[in-house]
Amino acid sequence: MWSRFKEKFIGDKDFYKYVLYLAVPMIVQNTITSFVSFLDNIMVGQIGTEQMSGVAIVNQLMFVFNICIFGGVSGAGIFGTQYYGKGDYEGQKHAFRFKLYACLVITVIALALFCCLDTQLISLYLSDSGSVGDISLALKYGKDYIIIMVAGLIPFAISQAYSSSIKETGQTLVPMLAGVAAVFTNLILDYILIFGIFGLPAMGVQGAAIATVIARFVECFIVVIWTHCHKDKNPYIVGAYKSFFIPRNTLKDIVKKGTPLMFNEMLWAAGMTVIVQCYAVRGLEVVAAQNISSTISNLFNTVYLQLGGCISIVVGQLLGAGKKEEARDADNKMIFFCVFCCVCFSAIMVMFGGLFPSIYNTDESIKALAKQFIVVSALAMPLCSFSHCAYFTLRSGGKTIVTFLFDSVYTWVIMIPFAYTLSHFTALPIVPIFFMVQFTEIIKVIIGFFMVKSDVWLQNIVEDPVKA
């Protein structure tokens, strides 16, 4: 029995060496990003609960934009990865062009919403039902923050279009270095601008926004300049701007497969934001505690998020090369490895995660609430890791309609009505509500297990040659 289990779920040394070669740079990049976000969060928290809450609300809105951009590049990325596995760099070039178009449309829409409806969007998360904080001040600080943050939307969108294409070729080190440079820029400038170091005025939340925008430009410049200076490693970029033409058949295929994925990411992110808003009706202390908890959780979630993301690279390239049996075998081993790692990190988070809220300069009731949120998030983490892996498995084979049903439809049909009902129509405390909503993930795990087992995702979507 052990030998069969080992053969199916445990890879050899070379397998893990390649997986870690892909995953470690992304894990390092995102761990540093999350850690700097954690420090940034602490620095903003030092100047007041209202400031921290206002920034947290805006960052929740920015999260929706970020995920929409991710969805915009991911649809074409499925094709880009398989084109690369096939050796069709012309096809990968067309996929890259599609990403630029998608990012442009999403960014224009986001700019219009954030600039014209800032007050309305931030106010959705403010409720005077709690006993801590001043919601009018939180609104003011949120508006101060968002008006500067919109300047970073364009460089972020461009850097994601480039970074995703670089990762499709298996080169994850460069995006990592660009991300590391950006987060350290952000951290240093945060300290200087928030508190007014070196004779500069203390700018508070506005300083935090300026630091983030500058960091976005730093990351963008690095990935763009590196890509164009290393055309031998990025052959798809040669002639990418000589024309903005995308062959009709390729465009049709990307839109057909990519549009459900883009809308899935958008609706999922919006759904997560709606769920946070459901929690927020219980008061500003819940917003602040949720902000602390999510910041800590992101530190620990990095491993399973990036290992799951590697599935789309490894399995996508194997499917593009027509190696379906190898793709199935690699997928089994990567899912097991990801969930195993996540169980270990979940245990660490339960034991030590509760220590982090004590660092914040905020009300004791908020710290206590954040500690309970962290424990619940840690317990749900193994479930989230499996469903995350199932999602990327289905996506790697181009099953974007299935992932749409699996991800965003599940969020809007099950999680949101459940969270809304519990938060608005029951007298349950917020922690049991948070627990029950988080553990609806069990349903998604069961669905994902049978979908992956069915092998419905084992398909090569770039078998036909691309016509220029």
Image (tube, rainbow, N blue to C red):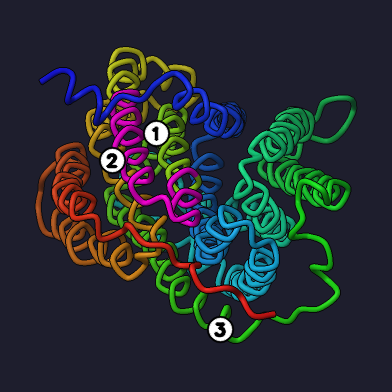
> What residue is shown at x 22% (from left), y 29% (from top)?
379
- Residue at image point 19% right, 51% down: 444
Q: CA distance from mark 3 to mark 2?
A: 36 Å
User: Please, is residue 220 above or below residue 432 in the view?
Assistant: below
In the rendered image, which residue does mark 2 sit on?
384
Q: Amino acid at mark 2?
A: Cys
Sooner in the amino-acid sequence: mark 1 or mark 3: 3
Q: Which quadrant holds residue 287?
A: top left
Name the mark nearer the viewer: 1 or 3: 3
Q: Nearer the viewer, residue 375 or 321?
A: 321
Q: Residues within 10 Å of mark 2 (few under 14, many from 20)?
A: many
**Start and end of the magenta stretch?**
314-342
Q: Which residue occupies 38% across, 66% down?
A: 264
Task: Report whether residue 67 is seen.
Answer: yes
The amino acid pointed to by label 1 is: Tyr
Q: Which residue is mark 3?
A: 249
**Left or right of 296 on screen, residue 7:** left
Q: Position of residue 436 (x, y in %)?
A: 14, 43
Q: Measured along the vertical axis of the image, is residue 322 above or below residue 463?
A: above
Quadrant containing the C terminus in the rendered view? bottom right
Disc 1 marks which residue? 304
